[in-house]
Amino acid sequence: MNWLLTIVFYFFLFFQYYLSGDFMLSVFKYEKTFGKILFSGFLTTFLITFLVGFPCQLFFTSFITYFIIQSIVFILFDAVLLFKYKDKIKSYIKNKQYKNIDIKTFLKENWLCILFVVLFTSFSMANQLPIYQMNYDDMYYIGKVENLKTAEHLMDTDFFNGKLLSENSINVARVINTYELSYAYFSTIFHIPSTFFCRVSMVIHNYLLFCVVYKEIAKNILDKNIAQFSLLPFFIFLIPFGFLQSGLPLWLRVNCYDLWQFQTAMFYGGSIVRVMSIPILYIFSEPLLYKMEFKKLFYLFLISISFMSFSTIYIQILVLFFLVILFIKFFILLINNIKKKNIAKIILYSLCLISYIVLLISTKYLDHLSLIKTDSFVYAYESFIPYLTIWYDHDIILNLGIIIVLIGLCITSEWQHKIVYFITLGLFLFIYNGYFIEILVITSFNFFFVILRTIASIQFIILFLCGCTFLSVLKKIKFKKIFINVFSIISISLVLLFFYLSQNIFLNYVYLGSGISESGWNFHRLLDFNTNMTADIFESVGQYFNELTDDTYKLFSPSVFYTDGIMAYDYGFTLSSSKIQIQDRGGFDVLNADELVYLNDFSLYGQGELSVVKSLIEKEDISYILLFNETSKSYFEDNQIVLENTKNENPWFLIKIY
């Protein structure tokens, strides 16, 4: 059913994208292509959800209030769109223009994109790390989506543990991020469980947009019929990050921060910004290099708001991108006036370029200012430095990829095709060898991991241009398209074969941020059309609590336990129900660490005295306790066992405390 509901969701969503995207491109006078219309509509839709969601979060409205306001805004906006395009829609249906779609040509020009979405979604779904160990950050992001749906006010819950907060508090960075609220809104309308909506519906959505965005740029550089093959280098990311970073020879390693998110958590807001912000900024800012228009500048502002709703790491990317574009703009103006022999403007733009370079170099001395050199600045600076030598000196994308980008720049004949290469080269120079580290630290607001994520964004665009350069070389030596098709099939097949033969080897590289767990992958999940994309224990317990009447119940579960023979974290319960409050990250107020360990040992091993256990339960006012052995279960009455699974490889019992 979730798959069917997802298809219905896509039908309405992409119809919305198409109408709103076409409308925005018309208003801001951009050239229209299907790709531009699609991701313009995507950004417009999430801009609308931000404009409603941000004030609702700021003023602590309930989710129901937000839901009603958001629905009214969408209804009004869509009514305007339908009125504007009613004649086109009628003509399209009446003349049966959908019959003019050349499916054969579409498949020829997009088969690799389709395969990309299918394979990456399949590998993401099969990975056991998100299902049992919450993928490092799922407990917050999916937990937030789930808990928002029943929120009395939108900031009333600690999304890590489901605990209701007694005081209203605002975290500026978090309140700006409204994409989780948007996910909660859409998943509520289409009745898709939060876990499935995030881990499948939005993962497919984001992989699809990823392909559309990069193919759109590729069409500016390459022939339309081979543009899809620019994505070929990204298939290497089917190999888990842990192995790419640690299992390869030093010179071959990929050190791309949070690459696991691209592989197993493409629904994260940070993933969207990291992989799509630079190419989309390029697409919509390129016309400004030739002619400055306020309308287009304003649209870039709107795009930026939309990206900010996904992650505030976008700010640094935007600043660096703007600095690069500004230099290129001055350079183009200088060249144009040299051609026109306009001496006054040649001097003017030469001075602009010289001033730009001097100011840029002078930023090296910003750390001499006491206003800048704060403790947080020093910490971020010192935290980032080791990554330069340990990671980026041994990253094949930055070390070899940038050489390929330079080759592509040289063999590309048309100036317009060179722009994306120049932009990428400019961004690379900002991160190269840490020379402009002061700018990087300041624009990261003294968070070193923001710099690492910005570098990851640049690595993605470099890898993409490697694909473009490869295709440009093939075009120069006049290889036929059939060769590119065959080469792509063989390359992807070799990656899949390597994955199949090396799964056990990959499990030797399990560590924090590796994107791998010791339980590996379960591809049988792809055949379970009833999956909610969560472990059975989380789904069963979550469904039980969802049927209860009160707002929140304290559930004691060990922080770490085994189910289905796999290690799991109790965070999974808050992803399945907004009525569960767990112990982790201060979820329980009264019990201290030793007392929680006592309950933990009782739950897992049956150790401890029942009288002490009962006193601790009463002390914290725990409503339910989850047990994993017969000994501890035997202390309770049969009517207290409200849920159990004795057929599980690790039997469990949910006990209600009377």
Image (cartoon, rainbow, N blue to C red):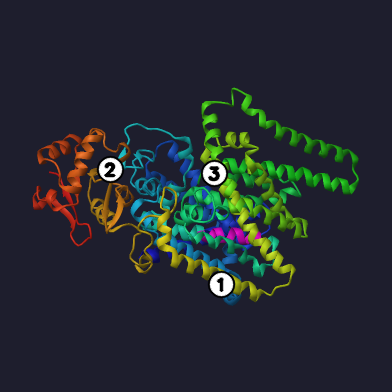
Q: Which mark is residue 581?
A: 2
Q: What element carries label 2?
A: strand
Residue 13 visible here = no
Instruction: Give the Cα separation between the discs numbered 2 and 3.
Output: 40 Å
- Magenta-colored stretch includes residue 209: yes
Q: Picture coordinates of residue 404 (x, y %)?
A: 68, 57
Q: Picture coordinates of residue 288 (x, y %)?
A: 72, 48
Q: Residue at x 48, y 69 (%)?
A: 497
- Amino acid at the residue labelled 2: Gln
Residue 453 visible here = yes
At label 3, counting other C-alpha atoms closer than 10 Å, the crowd grade (few under 14, some 14-19, many 20 or more) is: few
Q: Is the magenta stretch mostly helix, strand or loop?
A: helix
Q: Picture coordinates of residue 223 (x, y %)?
A: 69, 67
Q: Residue at x 43, y 36 (%)?
A: 59
Q: Which residue is drawn at 54% across and 38% down?
A: 384
> Which mark's residue is nearer the viewer, 2 or 3?
3
- Amino acid at the residue labelled 3: Ile
Judge by depth and name the residue closer to the eye, 369 or 187: 369
- In the displayed orientation, state which residue is furthest to the front: 249
Find disc 1 in the rendering and name its residue.
490
Label 3 vs 1, first from the N-terminus: 3
Instruction: Give the Cα separation between the discs numbered 3 and 1.
Output: 33 Å
Q: Where is the C terminus found, in terms of image quarters?
A: top left
Q: Which mark is residue 638?
A: none
- Magenta-colored stretch includes residue 203: no
Label 2 vs 3, first from the N-terminus: 3
> Which residues make up the magenta segment?
207-218
At label 2, counting other C-alpha atoms closer than 10 Å, the crowd grade (few under 14, some 14-19, many 20 or more) is: many
Find disc 3 in the rendering and name its residue.
390
